[in-house]
Amino acid sequence: MANPTFFTFGCRLNTYETEVMRKHAEAAGKANTIVFNTCAVTAEATRQARQAIRRARAENPEAEIIVTGCAAQTEPEMFARMPEVSRVLGNEEKLKAESWVDDGAPRVAVSDIMAVRSAKPHLIDGLRERTRAFVQVQNGCDHRCTFCIIPFGRGNSRSLEADDVVEQVRRLVASGYSEVVLTGVDLTSWGADLEGAPKLGALTARILRKVNDLKRLRLSSIDSIEADPELLEVIAGEERIMPHIHLSLQSGDNMILKRMKRRHAREDSIGFCAELRARRPGIVFGADIIAGFPTETDDMFENSLKIVDDCGLTYLHVFPFSPRPGTPAARMPQLDKGVVKARAAMLRARGEQRLDLFLSSEVGAIRQVLVETEATGRTEHFAPVRFATRMAPGAIVTAQVTGRATSHLEARLAA
């Protein structure tokens, strides 16, 4: 292989950081190298990474295999014990150009991520094989949800300066991207560590004001309890902000939310969705929900099922609870795995019902669709679309929704 090959697991932030690493690796002349940028959010994510590493070694016996990302940060010894692995890099090390130079580099380079106090800008010109660009605005998390290992993989919250974010967005738009997604580990905490403690609303407004050629701006997952008034104003009043908001709900039951050490109650989430829907009719919501958290009773789980309808969710991302060693939730009384699996299936079924209603309501609508491949794209509301004819990836086209399939819309160019 002439250039390094990258496999990215997990979040949009990892996707962005893969492009930073790609630039460093190619500049260092890395050849015959396979890089795994791992995720630690669930035990299953780590298992999949280990499986992929073994498969890659079997298919490429002479390649250098480098493992990095959150799972490498939290469990470096586990990856170091794998005979297939050549090197292990921590989340801070992976973004440094010198880490990709072989001169005396240690096999395991993973520093204390909690000691990192600032976020440095790493400008990229694009994302390989993607028509939607991700932009990192923040890293790490100051909260300690009882189920979550990610702060130990990412460190404490640290924000990029607004001017650096604007410059990255401007650079991507100049490279031809029509849509940008702001991403971070705890996106709505952006700015708390910067001078004057600006809020995410101010950042989004600044981007839209400074980058006039940006056609579409999206927000990745947000914590609604941290959403500032200006952010609500921007979402409600700026057409270039896409009408699709993904929420970090995790549960619909107040007792479980307390045991998770979340900062919101179910009433907060319901009120947030109702307020935004009143201020911007037609907006849609997605959410992360964990099924089978320790101590969750049938009645508590029923509250999670109910919140799907109470918030009017359209997209559901369901996580069967997975205990992560070192987290408080792993020491709580666990539910039977069969119960967890069954509850996850029930949540997914409820989510499919909500998505089914939304897709049916879209038939006949005129939508602006970002073309992702010659045959597919996404509407402003993030609904997947399949086109009747070939399209140019990266373009935004005006399309009429002519029908729907099980999980996507059918569309053609509007007359």
Image (cartoon, rainbow, N blue to C red):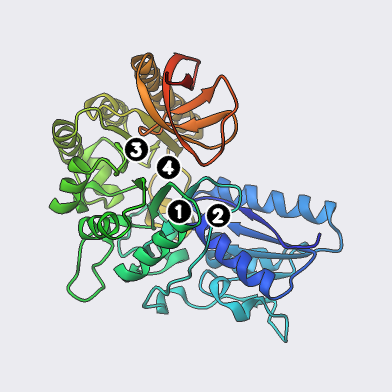
Vertical arrangement, residue 15 with respect to residue 282, above or below: below
**Distance between the Cα atoms at labels 3 and 2?**
25 Å
> What kind of residue is marked 2?
Leu
In front: label 3 or label 4: 3
Quickly name the residue at label 3.
287
Earlier in the chain: of badge 4 and badge 2, it is 2
Q: Please report the residue visible at 44 percent of the width from the left and 39 percent of the height from the top.
A: 319
Left or right of residue 295: residue 372:
right
Q: x, y (%) of residue 161?
A: 32, 71
Q: Are marks 4 and 2 in contact (CB under 8 Å)?
A: no
Which numbered marker is on residue 334? 4
Is there CB contact under 8 Å for labels 2 and 1? yes
Q: Nearer the viewer, residue 398 or 145?
A: 398
- Residue furthest toward the right? 61
Q: What is the crowding at mark 3: few (fewer than 14 residues within 10 Å), some, or many (at least 20)?
A: many
Q: Residues within 10 Å of mark 1 (few under 14, many from 20)?
A: many
Please give the name of the residue rendered at 55% of the width and 66% of the height, measured from the top-left corner. Answer: 20
State which mark lies toward you, 1 or 3: 1
Quadrant placement of the N terminus: bottom right
Residue 369 position, x and y percent, is 43, 32
Tell which circle, 2 or 1, labels the residue nearer the N-terminal end: 2
> How much space separates mark 1 and mark 3, taking CA atoms?
19 Å
Q: Quadrant of residue 283?
A: top left
Q: Nearer the viewer, mark 3 or mark 2?
A: 2
Q: CA distance from mark 3 to mark 4?
A: 24 Å
Instruction: Name the mark nearer the viewer: 4 or 2.
Output: 2
Q: Secondary structure at mark 3?
A: strand
Residue under label 2, please give it: 127
